[in-house]
Amino acid sequence: MRKQLSWAFLVCITLSFIGLMALDVAAQTGPTPADAQQRGMRGGQRAPQPGAVSNVVWSEDGKFLDYSTEGKRYRFDLATKQKQEIKADPPVQQQAARAGARGATRGQRQARGGGDQQVASTGEYVGRPGRGRQYTQVNSPDGKWQANYENWNVVLTNAETGEKINVTTDGDEHIHFGTASWVYGEELGQNKALWWTPDSQKILFYRFDDTLVKPFHLVRGWSDIITTHYPEYYPKPGDPNPIPGLMIYDLATKKTVTVDVGDDPEQYIYNIRVSPDGSTMMFNWTNRWQNHLIVKAIDLNTGSTRALVEEKQETYQTNSPRERYLSDNFRYLWPSDKTGLTHYEIRDLRGRLRNTVTRGNFQTGGIQFVNEETGTVGFTAYSSSVNPYYLQYHIVNLDGTNQIRVTTIDLHHSNFNLSPDQKWLVAQYEEVNTPPCTALYSTKGELVAKIAESDPATAANLAETIKFKSNDGKFDVYAIIYKPEDFDPNKKYPVIHSLYGGPGTTEFNFNYVSSARAETRRGYLVSKCNHRGGGSRGKAFMGANYQLLGTVEIQDHADAVRNLRKKPYFDGTRVGITGSSYGGYATAMCIMKHPDAFQVGVNSSGVTDWRNYDTIYTERYMRTPQVNQEGYDQGAAVTFVDRFEGHMLILHGMVDDNVHPNNAFQLIEAIEAAGKHFQIETRFYANAGHGGFRSGSALRNEFFDRFLKPGTN
């Protein structure tokens, strides 16, 4: 359920179809949601429309800005602040202009560090590991050796002579080398278990001890004549974990040393990596509850380690903050959560904190640029005082001085384009019902001009947002309704509440809604809620459901419906809810705990009791059942079957090695024991894994139509 997210965010709804994560996200070593959002901002326009611009080109002399909007090409004079229409470049020339702009950007990146600079290699990884698995082959950077994981062991092969070196020989099903536990791949993004040193002289590899881990037994081939047995060493909350280790084999001495990773059998060792210049190999260490993180550097000769960074949280710590190196490959920008909000500081490979870079009572989004020549950093942040989900653009000096919010309009910004001389910023701004406009800002924080505008009267008005107080009175919670194109305010509509609901995720953003959702074309309203425990708003908001999964965020989704049904067109007696993975869990919890808010639910691949899920994801947010029994009880759907009044469709794969099918079986058994078997329908997919059922959407649509559509006119 990989998904704790480093920073807030933004784009996690799709995770409900990928798996329980999230997120924090996160996806621990992969790109975080904030990173994904920033890439989207730098990328192409969502769709050409009034108020949006494309093909932005800054003149080499810094005097003009050229851009396209609504099929026309314009030149903006940065001195006179006037624009004029110009002849569009022929296609070939226009491509060249764009290439030139990209080339200039690359040059800036090379000058300032990061970007396209050379990065040391830990080898060429071959193939593509499955979900939760690791690469089984990695070739040395010099191409002379091939390292393989074979039959629980590490084997090296000389690419020229075919000579083989059996680095380990005593690996077996319980103690193995050159691979990792499934839970490491799923929850820590650990898809590598073999790493060459950049000079190709040594190979690092995992040693995993699964001796005490209890296997979960799945069966494959349910639609065949004979089935096959499939055990997975899958640690459940509170049970023994796999014990990780790291070892180093030296080709020259033919000796192996053990890395000093610590002697805590409960610890996690992951995110093994090398600094860009190849001088330092390191890994992340965290305790079992994942509220204490240490980044450790490895002495490749002795295996000894030393601490570079240490972070602690009362709730849970981001497992893999992503450092961004400066051009000396020694200092790096580090995103720290120690203030309760993610801010950047400069640290170095000796373990020293140099200085804090960003400050403020807001959550940062991501780094936009680093320019060491000017000593500046551009970053995004959720710094609007009007709405905590409106993204803004900031610039600050690397020494932490002169921090400026460049985008002064209090709406949601995206599609940033900074001039090469860093004097000007082009940024698109909008809101759910405010069509996009594009502004030119000076980087002193002044609105210079609106270079492309939309007519507010043309707003599609396909969505409506509300804000309400959380039931503890501490936070503003935001929800949204999506409407059909032929919306009639005098009509009452059935509703589908769609969610993922996992920690660190954000269910919707505040971009302009220009087209209707598919469900609305079938006669429904769609609602969503940015629940507590979600991203973009710092540790207090994100940690509000700590040790309370299934309580706080579920309360917010139910309260969103209760507030939305005050709208005269929102039929609160016909509300369906649907989600997959964590969204399936949230669906079951909502319909069980809050029958006044939800009447019909479709639970796809959902957890139903956190005791069934894996250690790394679950304990990050819930700790163990031994210390949080009440939290686990209150977070289990079976606890609330007596409240169940509606109808639920349960979809699950019989070979789901992520959310095991016993989750569905337990809930079905409890519902039947309560005499409510007529309120559920099920569909089990004989050969399916986690989610992605071919008929799932059709079954969901038919189920909702059957229970929510009668009498809709």
Image: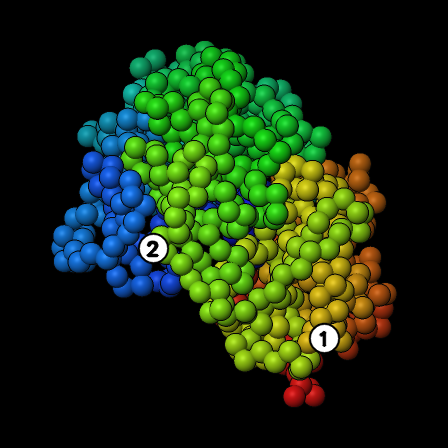
Local crowd at mark 2 within 10 Å, few (<14), some, or many (≥20)?
many
Circle on res. 144: none
Q: Note whether 257 is above or below 358 in the view shown.
A: above
Residue at left offset 20%, top offset 36%: 61
- At label 1, counting other C-alpha atoms closer than 10 Å, the crowd grade (few under 14, some 14-19, many 20 or more) is few
Quadrant assignment for the C terminus? bottom right
Distance in Å between CA atoms under marks 1 and 2: 38 Å
What residue is pinned by disc 2? 53
Of label 1 and label 2, which has the lower sequence position? 2
Viewer-closest of 491 and 603: 491
Q: What residue type is labelled 2?
A: Val
Tag 1 residue: 568
Residue at screen point 62% across, 34% down: 361
Camera-nearest residue between 672 and 440: 440
* Figure check: 710 above or below 57: below
Which quadrant of the figure has residue 707?
Answer: bottom right
Q: Quarter-wise, where is residue 712 in the image?
A: bottom right
| Residue 578, position as x, y percentages in the image | 63, 66
Callout 1 amino acid: Pro
Asked whether residue 561 is in view, the answer is: yes
Tell me where residue 79 appears, x and y as whole percent.
Answer: 29, 40
